[in-house]
Amino acid sequence: MFPYEAGYAESLEARRQVTPQVTPQVARLLTVIEDDMNRDELQSALRIKDRKSFRNLYIKPALDADLIEMTIPDKPNSKLQKYCLTVKGKSLLRVKNTVERENG
């Protein structure tokens, strides 16, 4: 994308806002979330068995960075709890996909 093309400034700003705080684990998590998914579905998609490390390395950092959100925020331990991408998380994925296309 060139500086004079439509969307360049927005893309550049989005990269600055969301890229620095994303760990490789969180980046992987974001790429597998489809609509609303529960913990088991996410762990299975990522092929991670240990619940504690999944929570500490993937879910908690993504929640803290406001990249994912709980579908039942008032009951974080609910067996019905699911996770979905936030607007910020969706924006990061768009930027990531754009950068990957540009870099080939």
Image (tube, grey):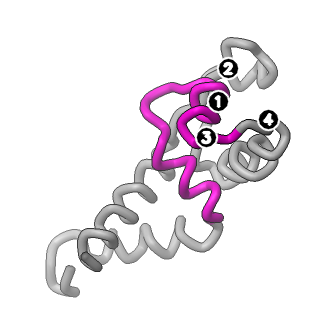
Up the image or down, 55 lies above or below 39; here it is below
Assign the C terminus to one quadrant of the image.
bottom left
Q: Position of residue 2 (x, y in %)?
A: 19, 85
Tag 4 secondary structure: helix
Q: Residue at x 50, y 75 (%)?
A: 16
Q: Marks 3 and 2, how far apart in space?
A: 19 Å
Residue holding disc 3:
47
The picture quadrant where one finds residue 91 is bottom left
Residue holding disc 2:
81
Q: Is residue 66 left or right of residue 102?
A: right
Q: Marks 3 and 4, how far apart in space?
A: 11 Å
Up the image or down, 84 lies above or below 96; here it is above
Q: Are marks 3 and 2 in contact (CB under 8 Å)?
A: no
- In the image, which is nearer the foreground, mark 3 or mark 4? 3
Q: Name the residue at the bottom extreme.
A: 3
Q: Mark 1, residues whose alpha carbon is within 10 Å: few (<14), some, or many (≥20)?
A: some
Residue holding disc 1:
70
Tag 1 secondary structure: strand
- In the image, which is nearer the foreground, mark 4 or mark 1? 4
Q: Mark 2, residues whose alpha carbon is within 10 Å: few (<14), some, or many (≥20)?
A: some
- In the image, which is nearer the foreground, mark 4 or mark 2? 4
The one of 5 and 49 positioned closer to us in this rendering: 49
Residue holding disc 4:
51
Q: Is residue 60 left or right of residue 69?
A: right
Q: Name the residue at the right extreme.
A: 52
Disc on the earlier residue, 3 or 2: 3
Disc on the earlier residue, 4 or 2: 4
